Each structure stands twice: as structure tokens, then as C-alpha cells.
């Protein structure tokens, strides 16, 4: 073991012992599985015993594995410097970056701490969680928790996404405190992780009367979820098999959607606006629709950057969501657009929150439309799916145009 690695590991041991450890991050992989991008190492307590949880971040998924502290350190000694060349130890006292050069010489760079709160290791302490995982029938049935009510390590990322999302709904719930029942729809609800958690939190923690629907195209998931809702005695929760386009919710108070695919997020936002929802909270998934239309126009100063596929991809995501936000503003919603969770839990971590306010005046709407048009012109975008839905919901001819754009990609 080289000198720098010895010091790095000593600092790691000391941070764990003194409870100043936050996390470890291993990046710049040079050996091993090509699809493995990085490893995040967290401190967790399992049945009261300290462990290191390695979260392996692959292109398409994450995998988690728990080690005792000593076994974890043995793992780290064998891969740091060999498989990973850029490694970060975060503690509440200092940050350490152990980097290897092309001669495989390690060097530690120290800097001020990024984080001021140490990992508390409360991996299995339900009392510290927003949602009670210990007694929950649905978390167990959904495969998030084991028989003891502890979160299964490989499901931790999903749990965290749901918990954070519910936290955000909670922070905005004053918008609906006078509604009884609060009418909620979760669009593209899949296995219903978020649906169950939101219903549970609002009824049992906030003590609100809730009438909630999970909307999903896949029949098997709808049956599966209705069965769990029954087992959980969630009388106000029902799952409905429907395409978002065809769903007629009547009036809604809250519309939510977590990772509804591509334009399904637009369909969900549109339904939220149409049904007068006081609150719309969506975390988009893939962003294909705008990307298919984007062109580098000759007056675009970003041309040298946009020739790179990755820049274009990310720009498409940012523009899709920025336009969604502007369209919501034009329709009387106050919006926020931000990352709701660290990317290690999901790379699809953007969230849009929209609270219904006053409808803008005709002049204000025209000003917002001018901003929308300017962005579209700059990037050669013919139309945004959500804009078309709102402009003319009955004329579906533009859907054909959209499908043609997708084919010519
Ligand atoms: C990526 S999954 C997300 C599921 C869930 N919201 C979650 O975060 O765990 C997207 C789900 O949306 C459903 N879906 C996609 N388009 C839909 C549409 N137009 N109408 C209803 N469901 C849709 C898919 O079947 C899938 O179950």
C-alpha cells in the first residue's frame, strides 16, 4: 500500500471512529466493469452494528452491498489506486482527495469540509424516517423492506426518492389544507411506491382525508397495487388502468408524477392544469420530444459546444423542463425547478413544483409567450408537446408530426 493510500485509510478509520465520516466517493475507473461509473461508500448501522455500504453506480442501475468496516476497508485498499484514480473522503472536519497520476503516484489534496453533518448510520431506525417503514404493509409488499421492516439495501435509492418527493409535497401541503377530501392523482404510477407513500403520509401523519388515484396503463401493476391497497386498509386509495390521455379525473387538488416517460409528463401536467390542481409536482423522466427537433441555428453562440452529443442531450433536458415551467407560468402557476435529491440516488433528479396562483393578465401572458418563442427559435424547436396540448387538445394532427420527427431521428 502506498504512503498516500495509507494516510487516506487512516483518515477514514479515524473519521468513522470520531463520528465525523460523511461518505467516500470513488471515481475515474480505469480497471474493472466498463459500465461501472463510480462507487459511493456510506456508513450504515445494521442491527446496531457499524457497516460500510458500497453503492455501485452503473450506467443504468445501482447495486448496493454491505460490508463490515474491516472487510470494507480491505476492499477499498485493493481498488483505490488500481481501479479508481480519483477518490474523495468527505468528513465534517476536512475533505481529502486522493488522486493518482499516470505513473500511479498517489497524492492527497486537502480542503475545507463540504458537509457539516456526519452520517448518523440510521439505516434501520424507522423513527428517524419521514415514513414509518417498520410497520408498513405496503413497503414490505413492494419489496422495499424485509421481514423486520428494514430497508433492503438495493432498494434504498428508490426509498430515498420517494421519501424526498413526499417531503416536498409535505412542504407544499398548506395549499390543500382546507380541502376535504384532498383529491390527488399519481400519473404513470407504476408499482405505486410514491402513491402509497403519499397516501400514507397525508392520511396518517398530516391527518388529512384523502381521495387518491394511481393511474397506470399496465393492467398487472394496477391489480397488484389494488391488492396491496386493500391489504393496507387504505380505503381512499384506488389504482385505475388508463392512459393519462384518456383519464378524466374531474377536479383535482394535487397532481403528481414521478418519472412518467417522456411526453407522459406533459400529459400529466396538462391534466393537472385542466383539472384545476392547486399543486402540480412532477419529476420528469427521459426527454426525447424536444431533442428530436433541436437544431444548431446559425445565430447560436453555443454552436461549438452543441456539436457534442452529450451537451445537446443535456441542453434538450434543460430546455424541455424550462419550457414546461414557462408554460405553467403562463397558465397561472408559480413554479420552482430544482434537483430534489442527490444524483447518487437517481440521475433523473429534476423536479418541477407548481402552485396555482392568479392567472396572468393578457400582457403578462404575451410576455411569457415571447420568452417561450425566443427559446424555441434559438434552438430550432418547432413545438413543445405541452404547448400543443394546451393550444388545441382536440386537434391531434401535431401528434403525427411528433411521431414523424421521432422516426427521422
Ligand atoms: C419509469 S416508470 C415510473 C413509475 C413510478 N411513478 C415510480 O416512480 O416508481 C413509468 C410508468 O409510467 C407508465 N406510463 C407511461 N406512459 C403512460 C401513460 N401515457 N399513461 C399511463 N401510464 C403511463 C409506465 O407503464 C410505467 O409504469
Image (cartoon, rainbow, N blue to C red):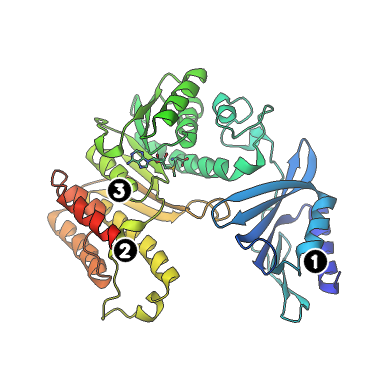
In-image side of 105 versus 175 (left or right): right
Gap in Å between the C-alphas at discs 3 and 1? 48 Å
Could you say whether the residue bearing mark 2 is in a helix, strand or loop? loop
Q: Position of residue 213 (x, y in %)?
A: 37, 29
Could you say whether the residue bearing mark 3 is in a helix, strand or loop? helix
Which residue bears the numbered disc 3? 266
Whichever of callouts 1 and 2 sits on the residue coming sooner in the sequence is 1
Q: Position of residue 65 (x, y in %)?
A: 71, 47
Q: Position of residue 375 (x, y in %)?
A: 26, 67
Which residue bears the numbered disc 1? 8
> For the view shown, which residue lies furthest in the front direction?
407
**Residue at left offset 51%, top offset 18%:** 231
Question: Circle 1: is it few (<14), some (14-19), or many (20+) Cα within 10 Å?
Answer: many
Residue 50, picture quadrant: top right
Question: Circle 3: is it few (<14), some (14-19), or many (20+) Cα within 10 Å?
Answer: many
Q: Position of residue 391 (x, y in %)?
A: 16, 50
Instruction: Kindly tell me whether mark 3's CB lies below 8 Å from ligand 1.
Output: no
**Looking at the picture, does residue 253 appear above or below residue 180?**
below
Q: Nearer the viewer, residue 22 or 298?
A: 298
Could you say whether the residue bearing mark 1 is in a helix, strand or loop? helix
Question: Where's the N terminus, which quadrant?
Answer: bottom right
**Residue at left offset 44%, top offset 69%:** 310
Q: Is residue 356 visible?
A: no
**Looking at the picture, does residue 5 appear above or below residue 257?**
below
Which residue bears the numbered disc 2? 409
* 3 and 2 marks in contact (CB < 8 Å): no
* 3 and 1 marks in contact (CB < 8 Å): no
Amino acid at each position: 500500500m502506498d504512503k498516500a493510500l495509507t494516510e487516506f485509510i487512516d483518515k477514514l478509520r479515524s473519521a468513522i471512529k470520531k463520528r465525523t465520516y460523511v461518505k467516500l466517493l470513488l471515481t475515474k475507473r480505469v480497471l474493472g466493469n466498463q459500465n461501472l461509473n463510480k462507487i459511493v461508500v456510506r456508513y450504515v448501522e445494521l442491527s446496531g452494528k457499524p457497516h460500510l455500504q458500497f453503492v455501485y453506480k452503473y450506467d443504468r442501475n445501482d447495486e448496493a452491498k454491505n460490508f463490515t468496516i474491516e472487510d470494507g476497508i480491505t476492499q477499498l485498499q485493493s481498488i483505490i489506486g488500481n481501479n479508481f484514480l480519483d477518490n474523495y473522503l468527505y468528513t465534517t472536519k476536512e475533505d481529502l482527495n486522493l488522486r493518482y497520476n499516470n505513473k500511479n503516484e498517489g497524492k492527497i489534496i486537502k480542503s475545507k469540509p463540504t458537509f457539516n453533518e456526519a452520517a448518523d448510520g440510521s439505516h434501520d431506525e424507522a423513527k428517524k424516517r419521514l415514513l414509518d417503514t417498520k410497520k408498513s404493509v405496503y413497503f414490505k409488499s413492494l419489496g422495499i423492506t424485509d421481514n423486520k421492516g428494514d430497508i433492503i439495501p438495493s432498494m434504498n435509492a428508490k426509498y430515498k426518492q420517494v421519501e424526498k418527493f413526499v417531503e416536498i409535497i409535505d412542504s407544499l401541503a398548506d395549499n390543500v389544507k382546507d380541502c376535504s377530501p384532498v383529491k390527488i392523482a399519481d400519473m404513470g404510477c407504476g408499482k405505486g411506491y410514491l402513491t402509497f407513500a403519499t397516501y400514507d403520509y397525508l392520511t396518517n401523519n398530516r391527518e388529512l382525508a384523502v381521495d387518491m388515484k394511481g393511474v397506470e396503463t399496465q393492467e398487472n401493476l394496477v391489480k397488484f397495487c389494488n391488492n396491496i391497497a386493500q391489504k393496507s386498509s387504505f380505503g381512499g386509495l384506488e389504482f385505475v388502468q388508463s392512459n393519462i390521455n384518456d383519464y378524466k379525473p374531474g377536479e383535482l387538488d394535487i397532481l403528481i408524477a414521478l418519472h412518467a416517460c417522456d411526453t407522459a409528463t406533459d400529459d400529466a401536467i396538462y391534466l393537472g392544469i385542466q383539472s384545476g390542481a392547486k399543486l402540480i409536482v412532477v419529476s420528469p423522466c427521459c426527454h426525447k420530444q424536444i431533442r428530436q427537433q433541436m437544431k444548431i441555428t446559425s445565430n447560436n453562440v453555443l454552436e461549438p459546444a452543441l456539436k457534442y452529443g452529450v451537451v445537446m442531450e443535456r441542453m434538450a433536458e434543460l430546455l424541455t423542463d424550462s419550457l414546461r415551467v414557462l408554460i405553467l407560468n403562463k397558465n397561472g402557476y408559480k413554479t420552482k425547478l430544482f434537483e430534489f435529491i442527490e444524483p447518487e440516488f437517481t440521475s433523473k433528479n429534476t423536479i418541477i413544483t407548481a402552485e396555482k396562483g392568479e392567472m396572468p393578465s393578457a400582457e403578462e401572458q404575451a410576455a411569457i409567450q415571447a420568452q417561450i418563442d425566443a427559446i424555441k427559435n434559438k434552438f430550432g424547436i418547432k413545438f413543445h408537446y405541452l404547448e400543443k396540448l394546451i393550444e388545441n387538445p382536440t386537434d391531434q394532427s401535431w401528434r403525427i408530426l411528433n411521431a414523424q420527427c421521432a422516426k427521422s431521428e
